[in-house]
Image: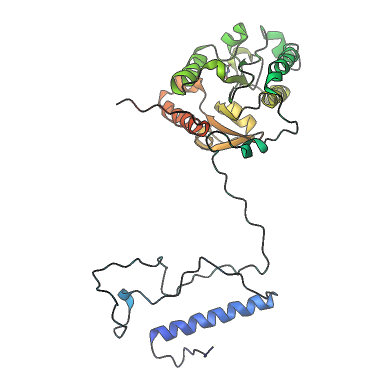
Amino acid sequence: MAEIDAETATDPYAEELARLARQARGRLESLARAGAVALPKSPELPAVSRPSPAIAPHDAEPAAEPPSVERPRPAPVASPVVERPRPAPPAVERPRPAAPPTPPRPIAAPSLFGSTGFSTPPLDPAERPAALAVLREEVAGCVRCPDLAASRTQTVFADGAATARLMFIGEAPGADEDRAGVPFVGKAGQLLTDMITKGMGLRREDVFIANILKCRPPDNRDPMPAEVANCVGYLDRQIEIVRPEFICLLGKVAAGTLLNTALSMGRLRGRWHRVHGIPTVATYHPAYLLRTPAAKKEAWEDLQMLMRAMGLVIPRKKA
Ligand code: URA
């Protein structure tokens, strides 16, 4: 290659070329010192092209086409220098960075199931109700949290189908649930039922509804960390038996526990997570929505995200 010398260059392009040549030579020498013997091809390198007419020197060749005909422009570069300093290309191929998480595809793809965090294969759907019944009995006799065991009317195991595609997970039973032995039957439960039926077009009995705690904390206080630690294993086993395709976490206790985070719901909602490898959405708790109706719009957006992934039809907005 002919040497290009900035000292003797007479026009700005020659100067620029000389500068680039020096830069390239320096880069190659430092790579060689680092042991590189070959360079990978860089497909995204912009083609070195003539400067655009706007900065062309006066003696540049005339444009081949009339200026009124707009040509596709090359990708803009920051300056005619063409290349910004880049990190040196690796001499050996490195493992590629993990692909960014992609939202689950409609009508769950096998790959989603293949990656559950459970070591056991899924139970045959026909066996799931019996497996849940055994677990329900175990929960009914639980006294791990002596205070809760003493104050409860009964444990509140779950509601819905053992073969549900979608599992909702709330916080803990309230007074109504403690009386009924069924989760989400009070005011917040009525709103959840509306979200499932009127919003998502599903039947409540087709989804599975459970809580982090199976006993009511007295005076509707938040679950204590020790209570969560004592109880969450039951929920893990419920998830393991039902193997829902999707999970929806209701409120910060469910989301904080299962996503192991202290982030606010505002930060957690609107995107996909995984719980035991299962695609999971977190949204506002129905009790919060009753207190803060303005948040219903966002909760509906979260449900629509879920519905799209599940391949459910999203009703058109009424005019
Ligand atoms: N709130 C919950 O989180 N769960 C219930 O079952 C009822 C109210």
Out of 130 and 97, give the one closest to the viewer: 130
Image quarter of residue 277: top right
Location of residue 283 with respect to 126 vertically, above or below:
below
Out of 144 and 249, give the one closest to the viewer: 249
Residue drawn at (67%, 26%) of the image:
239
State how many labels appear: 0
Quadrant holding the C terminus: top left
Location of residue 205 with respect to 266 vertically, above or below:
above
**Visible residue check, residue 26:** yes
Quadrant holding the N terminus: bottom right
> How far across and down, in percent of the image, does residue 272 sit?
55, 37
Image quarter of residue 8: bottom left
> How far across and down, in percent of the image, does residue 9 sit?
43, 90
Out of 99 and 65, give the one closest to the viewer: 65
**Visible residue check, residue 261:** no
**Outermost residue to the bottom:** 8
> How far across and down, in percent of the image, does residue 105 sit?
54, 38
Ligand 1 found in image quarter: top right
